[in-house]
């Protein structure tokens, strides 16, 4: 029986055992952490900031490597196929669950082929308009988008991005008529907003805060379950007429399925210790994130829930699968 088939019988099967003693001698060499996006980007930075502190705790360096392409699925596939010895890990992001919903032929299973270690950070997206926009709130925008014959367009970093699916979920839950306009990355969507191509965009805080602080843009909502700590005056989407709406992106560590609890335990403990360090929390906050660790079981349940949610959104919005 293949490893993935053996583990597919139940969510988090590999995450269900009680903690055991730390594996003797682990780690005794550097640990690779793969991430699937550009060097210097959010995923890369998170992996390096947290990995540095974990290395201090465990006595071995964490070496971050970028394996870019296919929405992060190349890195995920490499880790899924790696030996489950704790020396090859994945810095997974919210795109991991999105890819599971969007891609027809992945080389791995989104949940069953991985051992969850811990979440690291969560951050919301922001709905942003130009400073001179007539929309002063999301409620105003939704009212306009529900008017007879109306349709409001919005920009994101591209088809199948978490931002895009956040927009499709907003359409589904609000009943508003909106047209998605995909761009090649967040920077392009920001340029489109400033030039008047679209009336609003959905983007991560790091992509828009500079223009917001410069007075060129205004945030009208945050997609998180609660108000964002860096802009406590900004209402959530749920507060503005779409109860139950919640979208956050996240980052966390995973290992190949079959990695023993004797290895997962010290890794999880090292994550929790790293997230207690003021310099780590501050760096994550600078990126718009909230430091938040978890148990392996909590992370597994979260990934499964995200996969289920995005699968429904992709199917109902008839987004072409890749």
Image (spheres, rainbow, N blue to C red):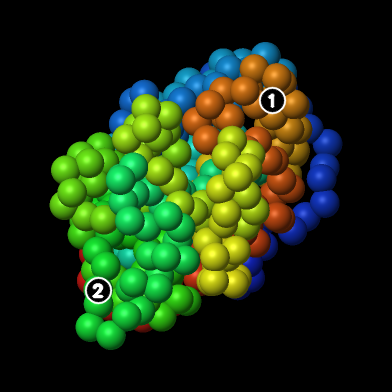
Could you tell me which residue is drawn at 34 percent across and 42 percent down? 131
> From the viewer's perspective, is residue 8 above or below residue 74?
below
Look at discs 1 and 2 and give the one toward the viewer: 2
> Label 2: which residue?
151
Label 1 element class: helix
Q: Nearer the viewer, residue 54 or 147?
A: 147
Left-right relation of 150 to 19: left
Q: 10 Å neighbourhood of mark 2: few (<14), some, or many (≥20)?
A: some
Separation of marks 1 and 2 at Cα, in angstroms:
46 Å
> From the viewer's perspective, is residue 307 above or below residue 62?
below
For the C terminus, give its image quadrant: bottom left
Where is residue 26 shown, x and y percent of the image? Answer: 69, 25
> From the viewer's perspective, is residue 147 above or below residue 296?
below
Sequence-wise, the earlier of marks 1 and 2 is 2
* Quarter residue 230 falls in: top right
- Residue 85 visible somewhere in the drawing: no
- Residue 199 visible somewhere in the drawing: yes
> From the viewer's perspective, is residue 112 above or below residue 196?
below
Disc assigned to residue 274 = 1
């Amino acid at each position: 029986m293949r490893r993935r088939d053996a583990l597919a019988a139940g969510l988090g099967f590999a995450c269900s055992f009680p903690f055991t003693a730390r594996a003797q001698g682990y780690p005794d060499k550097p640990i690779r952490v793969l991430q699937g996006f550009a060097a210097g980007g959010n995923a890369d930075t998170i992996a390096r900031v947290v990995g540095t502190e974990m290395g201090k705790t465990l006595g071995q360096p964490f070496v971050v490597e970028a394996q870019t392409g296919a929405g992060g699925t190349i890195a995920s596939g490499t880790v899924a196929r790696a030996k489950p010895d704790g020396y090859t890990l994945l810095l997974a992001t919210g795109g991991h669950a999105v890819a599971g919903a969007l891609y027809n032929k992945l080389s791995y299973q989104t949940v069953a082929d991985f051992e969850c270690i811990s979440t690291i950070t969560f951050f919301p997206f922001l709905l942003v308009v130009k400073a001179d926009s007539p929309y002063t709130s999301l409620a105003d925008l939704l009212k306009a988008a529900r008017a007879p014959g109306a349709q409001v367009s919005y920009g994101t970093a591209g088809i199948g991005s978490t931002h895009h699916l956040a927009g499709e979920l907003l359409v589904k839950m609000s009943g508003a008529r909106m047209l998605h306009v995909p761009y090649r990355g967040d920077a392009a969507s920001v340029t489109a907003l400033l030039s008047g191509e679209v009336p609003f965009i959905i983007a991560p805080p790091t992509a828009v805060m500079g223009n917001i602080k410069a007075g060129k843009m205004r945030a009208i909502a945050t997609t998180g379950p609660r108000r964002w700590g860096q802009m406590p005056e900004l209402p959530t989407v749920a507060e503005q007429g779409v109860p139950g709406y919640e979208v956050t992106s996240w980052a966390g560590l995973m290992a190949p399925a079959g990695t023993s609890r004797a290895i997962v335990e010290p890794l999880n403990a090292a994550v929790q210790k790293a997230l207690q360090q003021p310099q780590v929390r501050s760096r994550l906050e600078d990126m718009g994130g909230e430091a938040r660790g978890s148990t392996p079981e909590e992370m597994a349940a979260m990934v499964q829930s995200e996969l289920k949610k995005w699968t429904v959104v992709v199917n109902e919005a008839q987004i072409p699968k890749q």
